[in-house]
Image (cartoon, grey):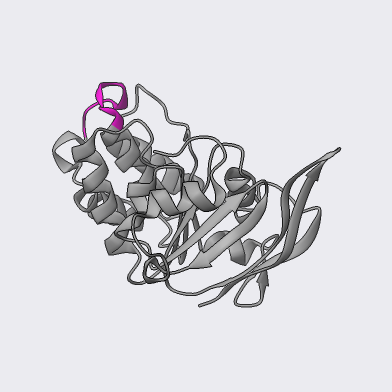
């Protein structure tokens, strides 16, 4: 299990959004930290095959990001994931399972398991428009897990959540990181301080730090602001 990012860049006219990033990621949780505009979302979208790198390559166990086999092992929760407000949580997941080509019998079993995993079983038959922000985000995690992904990419998953929901979400991510590659992109330092196996920091499109929590002495947020701070982090 190895995700290889090799000298990946993305340029828009005169702006370099991501500048020659190289990483090798194995099983575990990777916290990608950076202020707004640091290039995190652009990198995430390239890792998901939504954007094509200007240069460089992305592959998983030798499978290129552009191939169907890569997408089959990928789960993605974008910053604002789309949902149908009049669908129930259960019907939405069954619909997403159908889009992913999962058979009806398998889908029903998987949806039941995921609703339990994200603690939404009791509201499975309620319309999504009645869900709180935290419930919608947990539903988003569930849809990202429908195909049993080996790579799970989460872009700002706890933005707007209250402290209790944020803790619940972090606990869920910690569980998922035991058997998968989980990349958690955020500008909220506390999201990754306790659960990330490896911390990655971006600034101005470049990777400016790659290490473990033990490599950082003292407060993580202070370290980030002192070394690389541009903009605000929470």
- Percent x, y for residue 142? 34, 48
- Numbered label tally: 0
Residue shown at the point (58%, 44%) measured from the top left: 41
Where is residue 176, by image quadrant?
Answer: bottom left
Q: Residue at x 26, y 42 (%)?
A: 166
Q: On the picture, is 135 further left or further right than 99?
A: left
66 to 84, vertically: above or below: below
* Whole-percent x, y for residue 171 in the image: 24, 55
**Can I make out residue 154 in this image?**
no
Q: Quadrant of residue 195?
A: bottom left
Using the rendered image of the protein, determine whether residue 20 is visible from the camera's viewpoint. yes
Is residue 105 positioned above or below 134 on the image?
Answer: below
- Queried whether the magenta region covers residue 45, the answer comes back as no
Seen from this angle, which residue lies furthest right? 13
**Looking at the rendering, which quadrant does residue 93 occupy?**
top left
Residue segment shown in magenta: 125-133
- Residue at the image point whose x is 37% and y is 23% from the top: 85
Q: List x then y, in percent, for residue 65.
A: 67, 62
Would you place residue 40 above or below residue 214 in this image? above
Residue 140 horizontal side relative to residue 200, left or right: left
Is residue 5 found left or right of 232 in the rendered image?
right
Q: Residue at x 66, y 77 (%)?
A: 62
Q: Nearer the viewer, residue 114 or 20?
A: 20
């Amino acid at each position: 299990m190895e995700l290889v990012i090799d000298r990946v860049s993305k340029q828009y006219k005169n702006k370099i959004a991501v500048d020659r990033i190289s990483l090798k990621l194995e099983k575990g949780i990777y916290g990608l930290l950076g202020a707004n505009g640091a290039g995190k979302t652009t990198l995430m979208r390239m890792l998901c095959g939504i954007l094509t790198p200007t240069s460089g390559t992305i592959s998983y166990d030798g499978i290129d990001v552009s191939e169907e086999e890569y997408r089959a092992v990928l789960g993605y929760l974008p910053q604002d994931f789309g949902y149908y407000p009049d669908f129930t949580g259960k019907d939405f997941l069954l619909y997403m399972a159908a889009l992913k080509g999962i058979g009806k019998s398998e889908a029903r079993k998987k949806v039941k398991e995921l609703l339990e995993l994200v603690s939404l079983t009791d509201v499975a038959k309620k319309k999504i428009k009645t869900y709180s922000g935290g419930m919608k985000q947990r539903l988003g995690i569930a849809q990202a897990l429908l195909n049993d992904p080996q790579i799970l990419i989460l872009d700002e998953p706890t933005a707007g959540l209250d402290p209790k929901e944020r803790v619940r979400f972090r606990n869920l991510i910690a569980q998922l990181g035991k058997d998968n590659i989980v990349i958690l992109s955020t500008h909220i330092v506390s999201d990754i301080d306790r659960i990330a196996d490896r911390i990655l920091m971006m600034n101005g499109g470049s990777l400016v730090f790659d290490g473990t929590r033990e490599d950082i002495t003292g407060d993580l947020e202070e370290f980030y602001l002192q070394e690389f701070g541009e903009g605000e982090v929470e």
